[in-house]
Amino acid sequence: MASLYEGLLGHAERYLGPVTHAEPPDVLGYNRGFAIGFHRHPEHRMVSAASTGLRFQDLEFQLPEEIVCSARPGQEQEAGHLVHFAATSALKNGKGHGYGGGYRNADPLIPETRISSLAYSAHPHLPEEFDHFRNADGEAVLRFVTVVPMTDPEFRFVLDEKDGLHGLMEVWRLNGTDILDLHRKSAV
């Protein structure tokens, strides 16, 4: 009998690029409940960190999840840190993130950056087919939740804007903001 997630790695690599290296679940000296794979996109200047194993945890999910964060080459560790943060948060809260939520911190989540907030969303740079992994019958069996890093002013903008994150994404588009750059300035 085939695994429910047979083909998941191929799906992730098709959209994120091949895995270049990984952190095992016990990288911190204990089993944190998930590993993190690092991907490099073959065509775009984009690297991604993706959890693997969160889907097996005893969490309340609308659909089992794995967490992804994409960034510019050279920022793999920062993206991995944000994936670790989001996955650990899900484990502590006992439930997945889904789309539409977020997190705000008083201080930067990544040292020496302005990134202090996150939105949980579909991937803003990839086709929507990436966001859900489907089994052989075409049924969605896993959702990739993308961590979209934001500065504090951007997070407050999302809260105040009637179009929420979509409104901020439009501001980013109009300003030519490179949201993959985790060391960028705020767009608002």
Image (cartoon, rainbow, N blue to C red):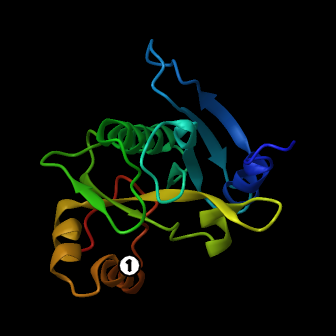
Question: Which residue does the image show at 15% across and 79% down from the upper left?
Answer: 160
Q: Quickly name the residue at label 1.
A: 169
Quadrant including the N terminus: top right
In the shown orientation, is residue 5 left or right of residue 37?
Answer: right
Considering only vertical position in the picture, is 108 above or below 121? above
Quadrant including the C terminus: bottom left
Considering only vertical position in the picture, is 58 above or below 138? above
Query: Quick check: can you spot residue 128?
Result: yes
Residue 179 locus on image (x, y percent)? 42, 65
Binning the other alpha carbons within 10 Å of mark 1 as few (below 14), some (14 to 19) or many (20 upward) gives some
Question: Which residue does the image show at 38% across and 53% down from the upper left?
Answer: 182
In the shown orientation, is residue 66 left or right of residue 176?
Answer: right
Nearer to the camera, 178 or 82? 82
Q: In the rendered structure, which amino acid carries the disc numbered 1?
A: Met
In the shown orientation, is residue 18 left or right of residue 87?
Answer: right
- Secondary element at tag 1: helix
Residue 186 locus on image (x, y percent)? 25, 66
Residue 78 locus on image (x, y percent)? 42, 41
